[in-house]
Image (cartoon, rainbow, N blue to C red):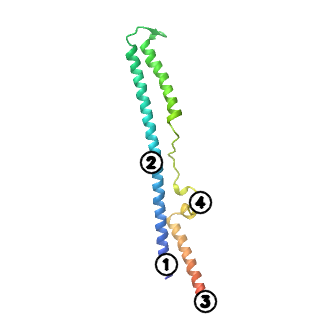
C-alpha cells in the first residue's frame, strides 16, 4: 500500500512539476511577445521618420532646383537637401529617442529562476526528478510515521 501511495505521489509531483514548467514557458513566451510588439512599434516609428526625412530631402530638391542662388558656394538645392536634410534627420532621431523608443529587455531570465514568495522554493529551483525524490522522501516519512503510530496503538 505504501508503495502505490509513493508512486501515486511521485506521479502527482511529476505532473505538478511539468505543469509548472509549461506555465513558466508560457509566461516567458508572453513576455517575449510583449517585447516584440514594442519592437514592432518602434520599427514602425523609425520607418515613418525615415519616410518623412526622405520626402523632405526630395521635396527640398524639387522646390529649390530652379533657383540659381548659391549658399556657401554651393547650389541652394544642395544646401537645403543635404545639409538641411542632415539637420532634419538629427532632429528626427532626437524626437524618436526621447518620445517613442523605450527600453526593451530581451535577455529575460527564466521565470523559474525568479524568486517569488507565492511559489514554493522546491518548485523554483528543482527539476522534475529532484522534486519527485523530495515527494518520495515525504511519502516514506509519512508511511513510517503511520507504521509507528499503528505499532504504538497495538
At x 55%, y 77%, the residue is: 140
Q: Which residue is mark 4?
A: 117
Which mark sits nearer the N-terminus, 4 or 1?
1
Q: Which mark is residue 33?
A: 2
Query: Disc 2 to disc 1, how far (Cα)?
Result: 42 Å
Q: Which residue is mark 3?
A: 153
Q: Which mark is residue 5?
A: 1
Which mark sits nearer the N-terminus, 2 or 3?
2
Which mark sits nearer the N-terminus, 3 or 4?
4
Q: In this rendering, would 38 be left or right of 140?
A: left
- In the rendered image, the vertical position of residue 14 relative to residue 64, given as above or below: below
Q: Which mark is residue 28?
A: none
Query: Disc 3 to disc 4, how far (Cα)?
Result: 40 Å
Query: Disc 4 to disc 1, how far (Cα)?
Result: 29 Å
Judged from this view, the residue extending furthest toward the front is 99
Which mark sits nearer the N-terminus, 2 or 1?
1
Q: Nearer the viewer, mark 1 or mark 3?
A: 3
- In the rendered image, the vertical position of residue 151 relative to residue 134, given as above or below: below
Q: Nearer the viewer, mark 2 or mark 1?
A: 2
Secondary element under disc 3, as helix, strand or loop, is helix
Amino acid at each position: 500500500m505504501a508503495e502505490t501511495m509513493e508512486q501515486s505521489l511521485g506521479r502527482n509531483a511529476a505532473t505538478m512539476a511539468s505543469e509548472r514548467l509549461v506555465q513558466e514557458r508560457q509566461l516567458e513566451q508572453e513576455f517575449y511577445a510583449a517585447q516584440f510588439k514594442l519592437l514592432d512599434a518602434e520599427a514602425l516609428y523609425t520607418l515613418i521618420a525615415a519616410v518623412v526625412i526622405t520626402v523632405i530631402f526630395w521635396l527640398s530638391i524639387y522646390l529649390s532646383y530652379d533657383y540659381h542662388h548659391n549658399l556657401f558656394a554651393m547650389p541652394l538645392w544642395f544646401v537645403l537637401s543635404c545639409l538641411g536634410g542632415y539637420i532634419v534627420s538629427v532632429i528626427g532621431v532626437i524626437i524618436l529617442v526621447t518620445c517613442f523608443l523605450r527600453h526593451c529587455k530581451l535577455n529575460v531570465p527564466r521565470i523559474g529562476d525568479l524568486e517569488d514568495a507565492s511559489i514554493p522554493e522546491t518548485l523554483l529551483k528543482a527539476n522534475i526528478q529532484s522534486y519527485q525524490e523530495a515527494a518520495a522522501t515525504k511519502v516514506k516519512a509519512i508511511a513510517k510515521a503511520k507504521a509507528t503510530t499503528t505499532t504504538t496503538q497495538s
